Amino acid sequence: MNDVVKYNEGSDPANRPVIDFLFGEFQQALPSATFKVWHGAPVFFLEDIPVVGYQNHKHGVKVLFWSGKDFSEPGLLGIGKHRAAGITYTDVTSINVEDLRRYLRLSSEIIWDYRSLRPGK
């Protein structure tokens, strides 16, 4: 069984509908992406570069877009010192599907190459 499927199945039952919905949307929007549990959470990659992921939390499901700050979307909050931004969903009804699909489209168009941030590069 895929490690992402195991992660999803082991998630907080209250968050499971959100996780299942996001997983389906991510697969539909990013059909060429590979995905795996990376640093403890499911992450989708395009050409080995992380673009989006989600994490089960006590108060909802956090979604992280690695290049999200460059999307210039008011619904996303900047995270950390690099280009990441994210949003938290508490239930499926809190997901603005139109916004999510736009964010996913942008995640495949605007890709910050984090590999170039390694020391010595």
Image: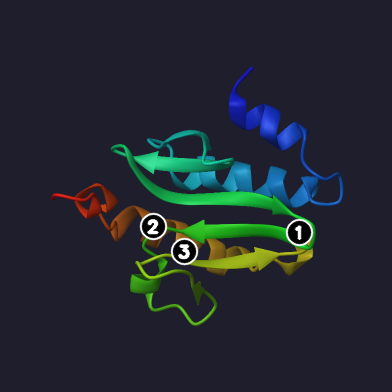
Q: CA distance from mark 3 to mark 2?
A: 6 Å
Question: How far across and how far down the image is residue 91, in percent?
Answer: 79, 61
Question: How far across and how far down the image is residue 108, in percent?
Answer: 35, 53
> Identity of the amino acid at label 1?
Val
Above or below 49: residue 95: below
Residue ID for mark 3: 103
> Identity of the amino acid at label 2?
Ser
Residue lying at the far top in this picture: please name it: 1
Q: Residue at x 43, y 37 (%)?
A: 31
Q: CA distance from mark 1 to mark 2?
A: 21 Å
Q: Residue at x 64, y 17 (%)?
A: 1
> Identity of the amino acid at label 3?
Tyr
Residue ID for mark 1: 92
Residue lying at the far front in this picture: please name it: 120
- Circle number at residue 1: none
Task: Tell me if mark 1 has few (under 14), some (14-19) or many (20+) residues whose alpha carbon lies within 10 angstroms of its own.
Answer: some
Residue 9 lies left or right of residue 70; in this view the side is right
Q: Mark 1 falls on what kind of element?
A: helix
| Front residue (pair 41, 72) | 41
Labels 3 and 2 touching (C-beta < 8 A): yes
Q: Residue at x 48, y 70 (%)?
A: 79
Q: Residue at x 73, y 52 (%)?
A: 18
Mark sitting earlier along the chain (3/1): 1
Residue lying at the far left in this picture: please name it: 121
- Circle number at residue 107: 2
